[in-house]
């Protein structure tokens, strides 16, 4: 299976989840480069910094973000609020997949209201789910 994305970003406060998800993405050969962040605020700052850099750095802007919902300091929905303020060239380039352990139907409903969330997946991430991912 060919690599589908240049850069993938994982945002989850659980380092073990990030490691497992990174290994799953590598096994599925979904991306050339995988960036991980253990906090949504750090991820937003990273995107802002990349956007300000040279043309070469623009290629480091992720094609897809796997975003957890329940995180301290800034949750996934607060990340989306900040993401909406990013320049259009960044927002339009990135597809967001909510990857969560939340079984709360309100979270699913709220995620569906965001024009940037393309998919809502419950943890754990599996090869089967990744192979069927169509975003």
Image (cartoon, rainbow, N blue to C red):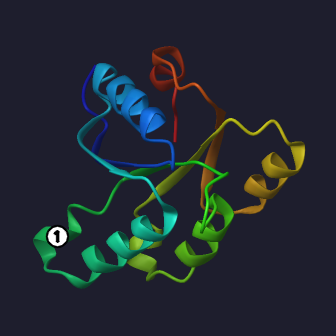
Is 73 placed left or right of 32 in the picture?
right
Return the x and y of residue 102 as percentages of the image width and height.
75, 39
Q: Residue farthest to the top? A: 128
Please tell me how many numbered marks the rendered image carries: 1
Is 36 placed left or right of 86 in the picture?
left
Q: Residue farthest to the right? A: 105
126 in relation to 90, above or below: above
Name which quarter of the figure residue 89 lies in: bottom left
Q: Nearer the viewer, residue 57 or 46?
A: 46
Return the x and y of residue 39 as percentages of the image width and height.
47, 60
Is 94 placed left or right of 80 in the picture?
left
Per the image, the residue denoted by label 1 is 57
Name which quarter of the figure residue 79 lies in: bottom right
Residue at image x 78%, y 61%? 113
Is 123 placed left or right of 5 in the picture?
right
Return the x and y of residue 57 as percentages of the image width and height.
16, 70
36 in relation to 46, above or below: above
120 in relation to 54, above or below: above
User: Is the residue marked by circle 1 packed among few (<14), some (14-19), or many (20+) residues within 10 Å?
Assistant: few
Q: Nearer the viewer, residue 24 or 72?
A: 72
Disc 1 element: helix
Residue at image x 52%, y 42%? 135
Q: The N terminus is located in which quarter?
A: top left
Residue at image x 80%, y 57%? 110
Residue at image x 62%, y 59%? 76
Return the x and y of residue 134 as percentages of the image width and height.
52, 34
């Amino acid at each position: 299976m060919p690599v589908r994305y240049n850069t993938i970003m994982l945002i989850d406060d659980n380092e073990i989840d990030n490691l497992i998800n990174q290994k799953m993405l590598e096994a599925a050969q979904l991306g050339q480069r995988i960036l991980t962040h253990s906090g949504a605020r750090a991820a937003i700052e990273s995107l802002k910094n990349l956007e300000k850099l040279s043309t070469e750095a623009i290629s480091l802007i992720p094609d897809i973000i796997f975003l957890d919902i329940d995180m301290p300091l800034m949750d996934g929905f607060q990340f989306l609020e900040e993401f909406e303020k990013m320049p259009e060239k960044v927002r339009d380039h990135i597809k967001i997949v909510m990857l969560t352990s939340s079984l709360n139907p309100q979270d699913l409903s709220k995620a569906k209201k965001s024009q940037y969330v393309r998919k809502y997946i419950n943890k754990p991430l599996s090869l089967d789910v990744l192979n069927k991912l169509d975003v």
